[in-house]
Image (spheres, rainbow, N blue to C red):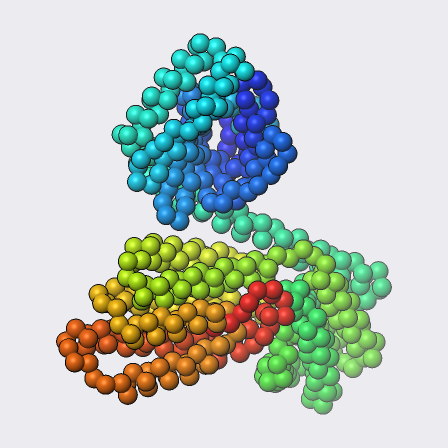
Amino acid sequence: MKLSTGMTVTIHSYKHNKKLHRVWKKSMVLYQDQHLLITANNHTKVIEADGRSWHTKEPAICYFYSELWFNIIGMLKKDGVYFYCNLSSPYLYDGEAVKYIDYDLDIKVYPDGHFIVLDEKEYHAHQDSMCYSNEIQSIIETQKKLLIEKIENKEIPFCLTDIHVLYDQYKSMMKKWGFHLRLLNTTIKMSLVGILVSLITRELGLEYWLTAGIVGILSISLTKRDSIVSSIKRVVDAIFALMLSTLMFIAFGYTFGIFALFIIIFIFSSYMLKIQEGIILSLVLVTHLLAVGTFDFNMIGNELAILFIAVGVALVFNILYPQSSEKELDRHVSSIDQLIRDHLFMLSILLKDPEYHEEYFRHYAMLDRKISDTIDLVELVDKDLLFANDHSYLSYLHMRKEQSSYIRHMYNQALKIKKLHPFALQISAYVRTLVDDIGIYNRAIVQLKKLDQLQQFYKASPLPETREEFEIRATLYQILNEIESLLMVKVDFHHAYPEFGEKRSKWAFFYAFV
């Protein structure tokens, strides 16, 4: 049966006695031809034969063959790609799952290319207990030699080029899937609100019941978190618009010129009063008054009824409709903050012990890639926040990316230090305290004061006596300057978004600091 790219399949592993051995719940199809099936998964649920379940810890690219008696799983870990090769029957897909028989023997391949054969005792035990035929044993032995030959010759996928391309394809497909899901949820939410408001106002016999649905759509808040406050602002702004327009129309006439003047005054006033969320829906309501062309208490009551019904229905949907966007954004912010903490912690180690520089470099590369990938995801989620979106989450992650560049500069400076210096130990201790203050609150100002004290202490210290000590002191002082730049980026962010930390802390359950 042909599988289409992007399709999600379940994978079933059986033993020779036909008993189910293990199930992978979800894996996405990346490629299939008559010889090969390639799937990918990440943090997928795995169910064992005894009912126990667990989740995989890293992305994996899986190769299943229709003619070869093994399959290959490439696991993309922080320190490189590991391969887990299972001696097994060729795969088949029967519409229920991708299925194969596991024949116990495994070969684990490490990032440096060396490998070990696993589970030989289990294989020999099952030869007797499960009655492996001589033909099966011969096939397994032959296929094991073929697999080892592929590993030693670094044939696909062991050459790594193929697996990284496939992983990029998988990430791209997951982003598209996430965008389509968010688009579908937004469409459903807005459509239901618009239709329901129109039906309610029509049944109540209100004028302009069709446009009442549009007012309902315009009343949808960006998130559950802000729905109550935004609804209050919309009601206040709309009542203000109805009062102001009525006074201007009565005083100067129901003309387009007066309406244009009203728009200018109203929009300016709404922004000054910080109730601009209701501008568009308010203008829709005022056009109804202009269309009547004369003062009418019934029309004022009609518009107020539309307002309260539309805002009320939208508020109910905002609160009850499943919405994961901000939870997803909070999760991304939390993960990036943790990466920054880890990165600074490793910097503190590097300053004390330069031998860690290789591990530090790998960690930095992972951090930089993770931040870039997360920003791409947040840009998609950010598009789901349609109204009153200040893009603070996106700005926050861009701020963290800029900070990561300063950390990279500090790393490069630290690598120049070949001899341990007392000042390096002090800076290491300071960086360690900085780690504890990483998060959404503005602790940067407090840390800047501590940093200034450290800088003043160094300036007051006796001048170095040797060229080597002078160069080390200069390098360490440059690291302090980089830390200052890192902190100033956070200060600037909080100047632009002063309520970011306070607002998120009411809803987040993770620590929030610099």
Which of these two is toward me, 201 or 67?
67
Q: Quadrant of residue 505?
A: bottom right
- Residue 15 appears left or right of 172: right
- Residue 406 appears left or right of 201: left
Locate residue 198, reporting x and y percent: 76, 60
- Residue 281 appears left or right of 202: left
Q: Quadrant of residue 62?
A: top left
Residue found at the very far bottom of the displayed protein? 251
Q: Is residue 117 above or below residue 124?
A: below
Which of these two is toward me, 299 or 311?
311
Task: Give the residue drawn at x 22%, y 65%.
Answer: 418
Q: Is residue 78 above or below residue 33?
A: below
Task: Give the residue drawn at x 73%, y 83%.
Answer: 243
Residue found at the very far top of the displayed protein? 134
Locate residue 79, reporting x and y percent: 37, 48
Task: Give the residue drawn at x 23%, y 76%.
Answer: 474
Locate residue 172, reporting x and y percent: 45, 47
Q: Is residue 438 above or below residue 51?
A: below
- The answer to whether residue 451 of the structure is visible from this angle is yes
Task: Give the residue drawn at x 76%, y 67%.
Answer: 312
Locate residue 394, reporting x and y percent: 48, 65
- The answer to whether residue 385 of the structure is visible from this angle is no
Which of these two is toward me, 128 or 273?
128
Task: Give the total of numbered labels.
Answer: 0
